[in-house]
Image: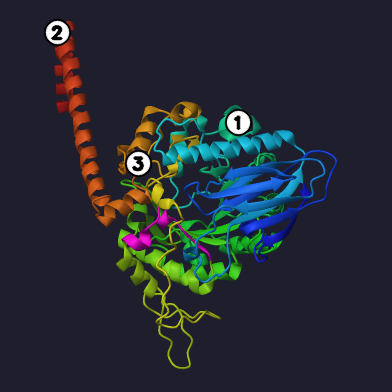
């Protein structure tokens, strides 16, 4: 890549992962050449309804790009002799979204450069067109899609270095679901076989029940993802982030999610093993190697609130501040009707169902995490807020959690958050938050969000996993085996899910996916548009279950009756079998 100068119209303070803000008009400058080239960069739009557009003018040739939300790669023709590109956006981010920032904010850019790879240019253009088409189909409520999924859930590796597995990991169940595919390799050939499903995707989300850094071909795959302009979401337990593995991810567009779930060695040992200090050192080395926060890869550390660790939330925020992570990810432990996980580890009895926190406590934890992260300057990604509105739907609980992290400082003493037990926690160099200064309950929904369905996953995502194909990250059951992903994308089931969501209701599949936070919030909110509808549809699910049982019983009776008439020895054999059971 030939470097490009962000010459005019850009603000200075951001870098790498966060990009550089541009105002309404900006200019990129580069050295001229006597051959055609392509201008390549990633652009981030905050608008979710395709109403923001970016115009790029090079040598009197103008290209207009409709911008989907989030980071998107683009590629523009650069004719011979061209020296600069003029950029302009049709609308700025409204000031209500950055009330304390007086700047004029348009879009963000990162990874700007020039190249001569025509095939790469073609792929990026096709990918951008596919993403825009996908969003248009979603906004219009289409169920049968011409676009392919912009986001792919992938299954890189099926083995793990932690044995026995983490106490909340359904390892045995997952491997049983994977069946004969448990050892299926994920290779470059896999990507080629996927064809346009891979070529037109922008985001890859690794959903392996395994540790990706154990893969022998991880380097080759990371190179292929980067060459294809993909953004990779990768989850790891972080225990084998050796110097070699750290170098594999430096500078790449990767969201690296590192599972912690504890702030002390003792709690970590009850959940995994006794390698907490090793994990801390690995993350420190990683953040140092990449040059600090804000540079690639994005380092996100994960905390799943549960009975075993909820009292360590405050201490965990302080650890995140000390490590200088890019995000603290608050991720609820998946709710499920029946999970038979029962471990005795490090003197602690972990029973999955008993570890699940009541919904009210989860909302309070969200509010508390928000306030703590605000005080300590730690960016928060709250997956309880998947689908938005957790702070607005459950204001009382959320505010109780938030206010519990604000204390009145006594004269001559610094303020410090209060832990879950109500005792003061000593926080070295902790910030003081004067009482009476209010923070917003949650971030304002992105512009254009009101035009979207409650869940966008069935339009934009498809999860192609060894345990089966799922329509979303919270899908309760696979819709088909792994190799039938092409059939699933526009299957009657997925079309029905899209149709229901576009009409403002949940499909039965959604209601049978108990870990979905959007469904759970709607159910708990008790709103006519959410909770009541969920309860009615859940009642329909129960009635439908009884109907299926009735049909099965009628079919069973019919089969037995027919055999009684057509097989002379059928009744004597059945009587003999029943008597044999009674005698035993």
Element type where label 3 sits in the image: helix
Circles 2 and 3 in contact, beta carbons < 8 Å: no
Note whether 356 is above or below 318 in the view shown.
above
For the point 69% across and 40% down, the residue is: 227
Q: Quadrant of residue 16?
A: bottom right
Per the rendering, the mark at residue 501 is: 3
Q: Is residue 514 left or right of residue 29?
A: left
Mark 2 and mark 1 lie on one chain; the one further toward the N terminus is 1
CA–CA distance between discs 2 and 3? 49 Å
Note whether 127 is above or below 351 in the view shown.
above
**Neighbour class for label 2 at 10 Å: few (<14), some, many (≥20)?**
few
Q: Position of residue 461 (x, y in %)?
A: 48, 40
Q: Is residue 408 magenta?
A: no
Per the rendering, the mark at residue 565 is: 2
The reply to whether residue 192 is visible in this rendering is yes
From the image, tell me which residue sits under label 1. Answer: 190
**Neighbour class for label 3 at 10 Å: few (<14), some, many (≥20)?**
many
Give the residues in magenta. 379-393
Seen from the viewer's position, the closer of residues 476 and 380 is: 380
């Amino acid at each position: 890549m030939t470097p490009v100068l962000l010459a005019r119209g850009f603000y200075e303070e951001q870098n790498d992962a966060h990009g550089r803000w541009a105002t309404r008009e900006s200019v990129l400058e580069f050295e001229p050449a006597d051959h055609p080239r392509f201008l390549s960069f990633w652009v981030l739009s905050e608008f979710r309804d395709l109403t923001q557009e970016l115009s790029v003018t090079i040598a009197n040739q103008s290209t207009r790009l409709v911008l989907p939300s989030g980071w998107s790669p683009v590629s523009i023709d650069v004719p011979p002799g061209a020296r600069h590109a003029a950029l302009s956006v049709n609308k700025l981010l409204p000031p209500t979204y950055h009330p304390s920032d007086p700047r004029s904010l348009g879009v963000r850019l990162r990874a700007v450069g020039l190249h001569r790879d025509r095939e790469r240019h073609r792929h990026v253009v096709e990918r951008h067109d596919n993403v825009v088409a996908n969003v248009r189909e979603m906004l219009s409520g289409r169920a049968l899609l011409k676009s392919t999924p912009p986001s792919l859930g992938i299954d890189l590796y099926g083995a793990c270095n932690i044995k026995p597995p983490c106490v909340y990991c359904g390892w045995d169940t997952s491997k049983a679901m994977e069946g004969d595919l448990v050892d299926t390799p994920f290779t470059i050939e896999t990507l080629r076989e996927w064809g346009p499903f891979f070529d037109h995707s922008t985001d890859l989300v690794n959903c392996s029940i395994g540790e990706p850094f154990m893969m022998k071909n991880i380097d080759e795959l990371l190179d292929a993802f980067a060459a294809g302009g993909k953004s990779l979401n990768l989850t790891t337990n972080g225990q084998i982030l050796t110097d070699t593995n750290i170098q594999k991810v430096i500078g790449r567009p990767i969201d690296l999610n590192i599972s912690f779930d504890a702030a002390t060695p003792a709690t970590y040992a009850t959940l995994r093993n006794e390698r907490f200090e090793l994990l801390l050192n690995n993350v420190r080395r990683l953040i140092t190697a990449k040059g600090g926060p804000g540079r690639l890869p994005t380092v996100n550390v994960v905390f799943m609130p549960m009975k075993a660790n909820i009292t360590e939330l405050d201490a965990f925020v302080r650890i995140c501040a000390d490590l200088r992570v890019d995000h603290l990810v608050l991720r609820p432990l998946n709710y499920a009707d029946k999970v038979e996980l029962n471990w005795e580890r490090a003197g602690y009895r972990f029973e999955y169902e008993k570890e699940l926190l009541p919904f009210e406590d989860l909302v309070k934890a969200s509010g508390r995490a928000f306030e703590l992260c605000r005080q300590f300057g730690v960016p928060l990604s709250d997956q309880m807020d998947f689908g938005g509105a957790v702070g607005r739907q459950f204001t009382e609980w959320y505010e109780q959690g938030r206010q519990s992290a604000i204390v009145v400082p006594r004269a001559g003493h610094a303020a410090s958050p209060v832990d879950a037990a109500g005792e003061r926690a000593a926080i070295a160099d902790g910030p003081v938050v004067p009482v009476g200064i209010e923070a917003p309950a949650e971030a304002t929904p992105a512009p254009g969000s009101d035009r979207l369905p409650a869940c966008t996953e069935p339009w934009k995502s498809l999860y192609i996993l060894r345990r089966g194909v799922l329509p979303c990250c919270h899908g309760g059951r696979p819709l088909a085996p792994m190799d039938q992903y092409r059939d699933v994308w526009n299957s009657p089931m997925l079309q029905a899910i899209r149709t229901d969501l576009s009409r403002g209701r949940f499909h039965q599949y959604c209601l049978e996916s108990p870990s979905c936070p959007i469904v759970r919030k709607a159910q708990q909110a008790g709103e006519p548009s959410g909770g009541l509808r969920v309860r009615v549809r859940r009642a329909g699910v129960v009635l439908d279950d009884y109907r299926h049982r009735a049909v099965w019983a009628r079919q069973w009776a019919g089969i037995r009756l027919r055999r009684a008439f057509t097989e002379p020895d059928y009744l004597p054999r059945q009587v003999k079998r029943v008597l044999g059971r009674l005698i035993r």
